[in-house]
Amino acid sequence: MGAAPSTPRLGEAGAPPSPGAAEQMFAALVGEKAYPISSEFWKQLLELPLTLQWPRDRVLQACHAFAQNNYQTKHLAKILIHLVWCLEECTSTTSASSVVYRRAINAAYISSIFLKFIIENAKADNWQELSLDIDKNEKKMEKFPAENSVEYFLMRGVLNYIGSVDVSPESCYLHHELLNLMLVLMSTQLCSGPSPEPKDVHPFIDAAMLQDSSIVVSVVRKLLLNFVTRPKFPPNGSHPMFSDDGRPGVLQRVGSAAANFVLLPYYTFNYLVSSTPEGATSQLADNSLLVLLVMIHYRKCISTNESFPSNNIYMGSDTNDKEAQVFHENPYCKALNNAKDNQYDRADVEGNAQDGPVVRLSFASLFDALGRCLNDESSVLLLYSLVHGNCDFQEYVLVRTDLDTLLMPILEMLYNASRKTSNQIYMLLIILLILSQDSTFNSSVHKLVLPAVPWYHERLMHQTTLGSLMVIILIRTIKYNLSKLRDVYLHTNCLAILANMAPHVHRLSAYASQRLVSLFDMLSRKYAKLAELKNDKSHKVISDHMEADNIADDMSTELHIYTDFLRIVLEIVNAILTYALPRNPEVVYAVLHRQEVFEPFKNHPRFNELLENIYTVLDFFNSRMDMQQLDGEWSVDKVLEVINKNCRSWRGEGMKMFTQLRFTYEQESHPEEFFIPYAWRLVLSQGFSFNPGAINLFPLEIHLDDAPSTEQKV
């Protein structure tokens, strides 16, 4: 980079800096000479228009020099402190000048580049390379709270700005840079293993967890509002990072040219000048959601030997651990879970005062925004987080009469399961499972009639109910899983949703009814094939008896799994016939039409009681069919006419009443082992790049095929 003069020269007062002067400023920033925090150098640096055209290797050289010299210069800590002071200036004045915004934006942007490089290339996991300890006796440091660390001071300033300043044409670019900076600050998690441990150090996100509740609440609310309102950059706006001719400057340019080494791939700026449909998206909304997801799913593990305030921890529920894991409470997760509808609050009606500040926003707007954005995997994770953690929002969803707003995008994504990640399929199914735990939901979906389902291509669907479509898609997902993923938990979740719905089924369509019986047929054929293989002695000519035993054990396990699946399907059919037969003639028709599929299991000890009920129904309707004096052949319409007529006289005589199956979703004892890596996979999938060699949070070379464990309880 060349030697830097002791006082970089910027040229004539008021004149734009020459390329040579700007070069000198950056050489000084990454050089060996330490500039005091009170130096005029910082003001001059942050007011530079970043228009240098450095090649990639030059920027990497600068990053290496900065990281090496930062131990002595403490320039990273100093620029972060100046960033906070710039943000305070932007916040305190009603109409901050463009120069003030430029200083803040440049500080956030330059900090992001060097911070990310240091994080990606750190040798130790305690982040000593950041060198955030600074001499608080320096001139001008009297403005710095003596009890604060640099990371706490930084996070308070950044979060306070995000939470308290509305996104406007003037502030939108600064909000954009601060959200990007937040992702960089929290990316230390990518360098840790998948299971949080007490030794893990994450200086910035840990500092975020210690902020005042008023800041926490304002940040969660603002990030949600950004997601809902989807603010756009001004159509004719000019980002301060661009040169006068509209071309990106050096640091921005390097961001896209060498993203793996430097910063984010600045696809975001392509969007500023894009004329394509993608240009209409809101990067502010997308990044707000990513920051929120990372923050709410973070868990800080602490040693059981540490002293901690009892009201600020929770313990892992795995009591078999010799030392149960202990976690600090996540205030951002708590704020999201306690968020209230600003139009109606049951606690207010009942006279229960809230303790401290509470996130308040329109649930109606949030519901609609989720419905519009569920094709994005990050939005699916937000919906899961809300329906699982926030009782008020879950209740709000359940009383909506337009459930198709959320369910149609979910069902369409399950219909296209082959193009989705296994994690996304799991999230979608768990959302449906949580909702299906409510009887009102199960009744409502069968009353909502869909004029058409344009994305379902196998057959035309006109005037089908939402409930019938759910049954069709869930069965289709089971069949897809059986042929492709072969995941037991996915089967279980699909069947659990169907079982919860079964007693409330109303006017199930002919196609859905046929699919239900064909599901039993498909599983029974798989079961029969496994049973035949298990009993076939001829295929076991294996010299290694241990290998033969292992094969037999595996086959027995799989046979047991399919026995359970068949029983659940029989429970589903039985529940419809027991509790809802009069209003489901198409189910009766489907069972009559394919009654031979039940015959092989009449004497099976796991199925005989359930099949007794099904055969009671078959006997009743078969006898009514035999009593008909029919001229000519039976047709579908004539059979349905007889069924409809006799459904009205059906009294359920001879039916055994079984306890209704009711499956509930329970998050596993250590959900952080799934959700922290999952949230970061979403961040990386949306353009944030990171040195692959530094990622320990998950294996980068393969897709994450694990899923959050669920426990279904009957």
Image (spheres, grey):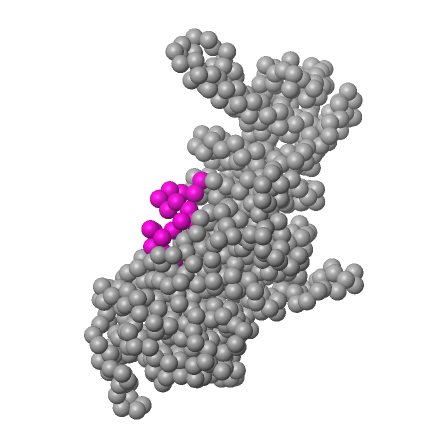
Q: Confirm whether residue 433 shows in the render.
A: no
Taking depth in this image into account, of 645 and 705 the one nearest to the observer is 705
Quadrant of the rendered image containing residue 14? bottom left
Determine whether 396 is above or below 135 in the image: above
Where does the image place residue 49, in percent across and percent down from the top left? Answer: 32, 78
Determine whether 179 is above or below 607 in the image: below
**View extreme (bottom): residue:** 13
- From the viewer's perspective, tell me whether residue 360 is left or right of residue 275: right
Taking depth in this image into account, of 33 and 158 the one nearest to the observer is 33
Q: Residue at x 45, y 29 (%)?
A: 483
Where does the image place residue 438, in percent across and percent down from the top left? Answer: 68, 44
Q: Is residue 128 magenta?
A: no
Q: Residue at x 60, y 38 (%)?
A: 320
Taking depth in this image into account, of 410 and 317 the one nearest to the observer is 317
Q: Residue at x 33, y 77 (%)?
A: 34
Determine whether 696 is above or below 599 in the image: below
Where does the image place residue 89, in percent across and percent down from the top left? Answer: 48, 82
Q: Residue at x 53, y 36 (%)?
A: 490
**Main secondary structure type of the part rendered in magenta:** loop
Magenta residue span: 688-705
Q: Is residue 694 magenta?
A: yes
Quarter holding the C terminus is top right
Where does the image place residue 229, in percent across and percent down from the top left? Answer: 53, 65
Determine whether 335 is above or below 406 in the image: below
